[in-house]
Amino acid sequence: MTMAPPPRPIPPRHIPDRLNGSFLRRLKSWETLLLAVAAAIFTFNALASPYFLDPWNLSDATFNFTEKAMIALAMALLIIAGEIDLSVGAIIALASVAMGAARQMGVETTGLVLIGAGVGLACGAFNGFLVAGLGLPSIVATIGTMSLFRGIAYIILGDGAYGGYPASFAWFGQGYVWGAITFELALLAVLAVVYGVLLHGTNFGRRIYAIGNNATAAAFSGVRVRRIRMTLFMLTGLMAGIASVCLTSRLGSTRPSIGMGMELEVITMVVLGGVAITGGSGTILGVMLAALIMGLITFGLGLLNVPGVVMSIFVGILLISVIALPKLLEKMRR
């Protein structure tokens, strides 16, 4: 009895270099899509309003996203690691109230900046202690601290307001470093480079990705998961404190309602930028492009006299859509 010869292996399918090259991968990337969307929105705004292309109007448009984008940089790292911070808006309020109270005692600009950043850092450390130290789920812990920090701000200030900030303090939120380029935009650009190098060019960034993909495996590989989580929460709190300095400086006054709802827009920027809400993937470039898109949309709607509540509705729909779209595409593929 003769045995049948084994079947010949099917040769691998050859994919031409022009279809398998890095250019096509970049073309298909989420960041490329965001860049195309940003260009389309920019063109639409330019055609819809004759005032849009004015350099000083474009400069004013950056105020719609710079403070939120600063927080989004740190939030992106936190979400890539599989965590989240819903208290950033309340941290802004508490840091602003602390700066206002200090100003009533005669503290000058340098002290105010240090107090704002320091309060943000302390709030982030407290969040990190709850999550990394006590092992609480980050979404539950930060919902609690969101109410806690905002409540403290209301207890200190009530329905009143703080003002009377020194003229030099206003430069952080209203000053220009060169031509129509604001200090906030310049600071955001520097921070984006720093966070980009930190996430994509260091061992610390690779460990963040490892934690987001599988925290248990990362811990067995020698990654100090708790320490990195603590550091990320502290960075997020610090960025919220810096954003509070810029926002308070730009507004020139403090109310306990400052920063209300900002956490939703920050998370929307991060998720729209391609960061997986479940952790493990994402880029700083995508987050910055998403921030630019949201800023252009907000400014464009403002030029067209669209009510602010429409932007809130849009942000909610955008957040749901970006999270749901991958799920729907996966179901269709199956």
Image (cartoon, rainbow, N blue to C red):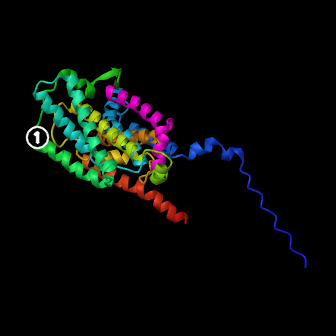
Please, is residue 130 above or below residue 300 in the view? below
**40 is within the stretch colored magenta:** no
Please indicate whether residue 34 sits to the left or right of residue 233 in the image: right
Secondary structure character of the magenta stretch overall: helix
Question: Residue 184 versus residue 199: which sits nearer the camera?
Answer: 199
Give the quarter of the image for residue 103.
top left
Q: Position of residue 227 (x, y in %)?
A: 38, 43
Residue 333 in percent (x, y) is at 55, 63
Left or right, 258 with reference to 279: left
Residue pointed to by mark 1: 156
What span is colored magenta in the figure?
182-211
Q: Residue 272 placed where, x, y %?
A: 41, 48
Residue at image point 18% right, 46% down: 150
Residue 193 on the magenta segment: yes
Determine whether 2 is above or below 311 in the image: below
Left or right of 23 in this view: 308: left
Can residue 184 be seen in the rendering of this structure? yes
Q: Residues within 10 Å of mark 1 (few under 14, many from 20)?
A: some
How many marks do you count on the picture?
Answer: 1
Q: Nearer the viewer, residue 198 or 323?
A: 198
**Which corner quadrant holds the C terminus?**
bottom right
Residue 163: quadrant of the picture: top left
SS category of the residue bearing label 1: helix
Residue farthest right in this picture: 1
Q: Nearer the viewer, residue 272 or 236?
A: 236
Q: Give the amino acid type for the residue marked by disc 1 in the picture.
A: Ile
Quarter of the N terminus within the rendering: bottom right
Specify whether residue 305 is in view: no
Q: Position of residue 139 (x, y in %)?
A: 31, 54
Tell me which corner region of the image, top left, top right, bottom left or bottom right, holds residue 53.
top left
Farthest residue to the bottom: give it.
Answer: 1
